[in-house]
Image: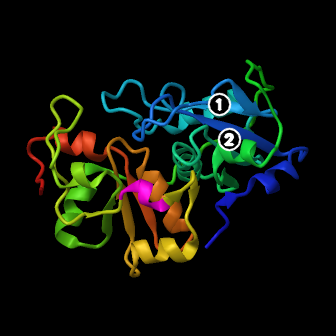
Amino acid sequence: MKTTIVSPNWLYHHLDDLDLVILEAQLEHNQLNLDNQFQNFQIKGSRVFDIKNSFSDTENPLPNTFPNAAQFTAECQKLGINKNSTIVVYDTFGIYSSPRVWWMFNAMGHSTVYVLNGGLPQWIKEGFPTEIKKESIFSKGDFEAKLQPELIKSKEQILENINSKEAVLIDARSPERFHATIEETRVGIRNGHIPGSINVPFDTLLEDGKYKSEAELSEIFNLNDKPLYFTCGSGITACILLLATELISDNPKAVYDGSWTEWGHSTNLPIDK
């Protein structure tokens, strides 16, 4: 397993590294209805990675859809990101949107990227300095995205996997949504889950905004050697699961980016409840 998360203490002692880029994984809303109590503060020198707008395919009707390589390249260059940048991603909710950004960089061929465990709340809790959030303009970077298509799965590939059972499909949504005991909040979306998938709610992997221990994560997932595909509502919390399994296994991993918003909207696709 490779290193995927770093502590606030590690980041504090590397703040002056020349190749370091700190990104705030900006996402206004979250499924846990957590208050964004630190929205006006940032870690010194950090840059805003706007998931919903700059780093999503806004032409696609599905939310948070993965952008193409050209868009990802251009937006990263605007943020001053280079090919040799070491990237640390944090979010203001602890662990929520930062794993999505971590996965996006990996899917675009950049592996020197890490998540700040506990995010900005843990950084502040441990007494490390912040600054008032401010607009900044950065020198254009030379980052180039190189898409790794094996890390992203389509609905056709997920449908095929129902029969082949080549991979284990893991759903990050709540048990109530997974088992269809409540209605979906998005209009026109059926309730239930993809046949053959298993449910590991993303919040069961976290404690006080940080990932649980590797031993606890191993017990929750109980993995075999099959590839792992992850799904959720719109592709955000699936990445929390993916990053958690990256801490404990070398299984091949991918995200079904359309997730339940796409699957539940397509009346010709099978569902279980």
Quarter of the figure with the C terminus: bottom left
Q: Is 40 in the magenta? A: no
Residue 129: quadrant of the picture? top right
Q: How many marks?
A: 2
Residue 149 in the image: x percent, y percent? 45, 53
Residue 116 in the image: x percent, y percent? 67, 51
Tell me the residue at 64%/61% (across/down): 4
Tell me the residue at 54%/66% (across/down): 246
Q: Is 204 in the magenta? A: yes
> Is the residue 100 above or below the residue 92 in the image?
below
Asked if marks 2 and 1 touch (Cβ < 8 Å), the reply is yes
Disc 1: CA contacts within 10 A as few (<14), some (14-19) or many (>=20): some
Disc 2: CA contacts within 10 A as few (<14), some (14-19) or many (>=20): many
Q: On the image, numbered disc 1 is attached to which residue?
A: 38
Mark 1 lies on a secondary structure that is loop
- Name the amino acid, label 1: Phe
Q: On the image, numbered disc 2 is attached to which residue?
A: 120
> Is the residue 53 above or below the residue 160 in the image?
above
Q: Nearer the viewer, residue 203 or 80?
A: 203
- Name the amino acid, label 2: Leu
Quick one: label 2 or label 1, which is nearer the N terminus?
A: 1
Tell me the residue at 65%/36% (across/down): 24
Residue 137: quadrant of the picture? top right
Tell me the residue at 41%/52% (across/down): 238
Give the residues in magenta. Answer: 201-205
The scheme the figure's colours follow is rainbow
> Is the residue 242 above or below the residue 37 in the image?
below
Q: Is residue 149 visible?
A: no
Q: Nearer the viewer, residue 83 or 250?
A: 250
Quarter of the figure with the N terminus: bottom right
